[in-house]
Image (cartoon, rainbow, N blue to C red):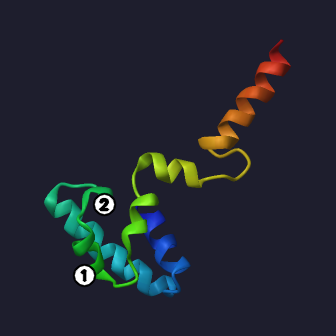
Amino acid sequence: DATVLAEYLVGKGLPFRKAHEVVGRVVRQASEQGKPLAKLPLAQLQAANDLIANDVYDYLGASNVVARYRSVGAAGGKPLIQQLEVWKERLQ
């Protein structure tokens, strides 16, 4: 989630070094509260940086993180399904 949150902020126009700083603060807060980033309230995330909007929850969380990795050989989502199909055909 931390990496995805940093990428989210960079995608919104925040320089990476600033995004890294913001994410570090948010991760520390989440850790102190014993919560994953995806369970933090929007107001708390926005207090860290006002570029964060409600759509951030489309990025955070294990299933959303895995779904965003679409590169060849990625560990989940469509690339995984494609690889399963390739190997099913090869093994028949």
- Element on which disc 2 rests: helix
Q: Name the mark nearer the viewer: 2 or 1.
A: 1
Residue linked to disc 1: 47
Residue 68 locus on image (x, y percent): 57, 55
Inspect the image, locate mark 2, and give the three-letter code of the amino acid beneath it. Leu
Q: Is residue 55 above or below residue 82?
A: below
State the SS at label 1. Answer: helix
86, 54: nearer the viewer: 54
What residue is pinned by disc 2? 37
Which amino acid type is marked by label 1? Answer: Ala
Q: What percent of the width, then of the height, locates residue 90?
A: 85, 20
Task: Check the image and name the residue furthest to the top.
Answer: 92
Closer-to-camera residue (58/11): 58
- The x and y percentages for residue 46 are 29, 78
Residue nearer the viewer, 17 or 70: 70
Q: Looking at the image, which residue is at 24% across and 81% down?
A: 47
Q: Residue at x 47, y 64 (%)?
A: 4
Q: Write the residue at 42% across / 48% down.
A: 62
> Where residue 85 sits in the image (x, y, percent)?
76, 27
Which image quadrant for residue 35?
Answer: bottom left
> Between marks 2 and 1, how big is the CA–CA gap?
14 Å
- Relative vertical location of residue 91 with respect to residue 23 in this rendering, above or below: above
Q: Examine the rendered structure and indicate whether residue 61 appears above or below residue 7.
A: above
Residue at 56 percent across and 49 percent down: it is: 67
Quadrant of the rendered structure where residue 57 is? bottom left
Query: Badge 2: how crowded within 10 Å, few (<14), some, or many (20+)?
Result: many
**Does residue 92 appear left or right of residue 20 in this picture?**
right
Quadrant where the N terminus sits is bottom left
Q: Is residue 42 left or right of residue 2?
A: left
- Most extreme residue toward the front is 54
